[in-house]
Amino acid sequence: MIPVAFDYTAPSTVDEAVRALAEAGEDAKVLAGGQSLLPVLRMRLAAPTKLIDLGKISELRGVREDGDALVIGAMTTHYDVQRDHLVAEHASLLKKATDTVADPQVRHRGTFGGSIAHADPAGDLLAPVLALGCELVIAGSGGRRTVAAADFFQDFFTTTLEPDEILVEVRVPKHTGWQSHYEKFNRVAQAWSMVAVAVAIRTEGETIAEARVALTNMGSVPVRATGVEEALVGGAASTEAIRAAAQHAAEGTSPTADGNADVEYRQQLARVLTGRAVAAAAGS
């Protein structure tokens, strides 16, 4: 199917992009890597009057250090995040989750910020961003503002972004020396996650000193598994302790039922996958 007609612009700076958005109003769409937007346009599920392509804004690409944080530009591709040595050293959970995104073709074109701003609850980057306590920097007509990941995701495909705002970068607190794992369950290769679990832990000897656990596709937004975290911290990184902590994974979740799984199945998946993810991170 062919998309409806629209105007197109490719600004070279963030300020130009924001102005274009403000002038176009709510009927405009932002194009990042296009891996989510273009299929929607072809199916005519969206009919924007103007498409604003961020591909020429060089300042939105790359990974850099800023004190105790990494800064990842919103237009940095999944491929570049996978292979960045700073991400591997200081935020290994992001690398491991990005490794599971779709297929190599999508990872070469899709962008880190585009996936986050799309806010699909089955997307593989939302839960890791939440687990690591990332902050999202947004530019709009009123200037720039920073929003915690826990406040950024509002509902299915809905974020705190206003019509005249774009996501410009993600600030990732360094988790140097932390162990991590992303455990994903899907029916076929390259498919969306039915359920997935993002885990980052810091151990002291045989004890788990800190734990961050977040769930993919267990609600309309990514969910922190706080019950699991509380059960893990201060305990041994043993198979028995991890299995017991994982039983809290479905607490406070509200997964949907669909053709892939009903609610009870997803809740059981969350418990099983959490146990696997924590055990893998801990080396148990």
Image: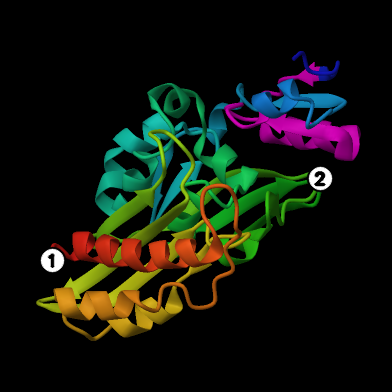
Q: Quadrant of residue 248?
A: bottom left
Q: CA distance from mark 1 to mark 2?
A: 47 Å
* Crowd class of label 1 (few under 14; some 14 to 19; many from 20; radius 10 Å): few
> Which residues, given as a range, are shown in magenta?
8-37
Q: Amino acid at mark 2?
A: Pro
Give the label on residue 229, or none. none
Q: Nearer the viewer, residue 245 or 52?
A: 245
- Identify the residue at image location x=35%, y=77%: 247
Quarter of the image for the C terminus: give it.
bottom left
The answer to whether the residues at label 1 and label 2 have Cβ atoms under 8 Å apart is: no
Badge 2 is on which residue? 163
Sequence order check, earlier mark of 1 and 2: 2
Q: Nearer the viewer, residue 196 or 283?
A: 196
Q: Tell me if 137 is positioned left or right of 181 in this view.
A: right
Q: Amino acid at mark 1?
A: Ser
As drawn, 210 above or below 70: below
Quarter of the image for the N terminus: give it.
top right
Badge 1 is on which residue? 284
Q: Secondary structure at mark 1?
A: loop
Q: Is residue 178 magenta?
A: no
Q: Quadrant of residue 37?
A: top right
Q: Tell me if 250 is positioned left or right of 1 in this view.
A: left
Q: Name the spot of residue 230 as percent of width and height, x first.
A: 36, 83
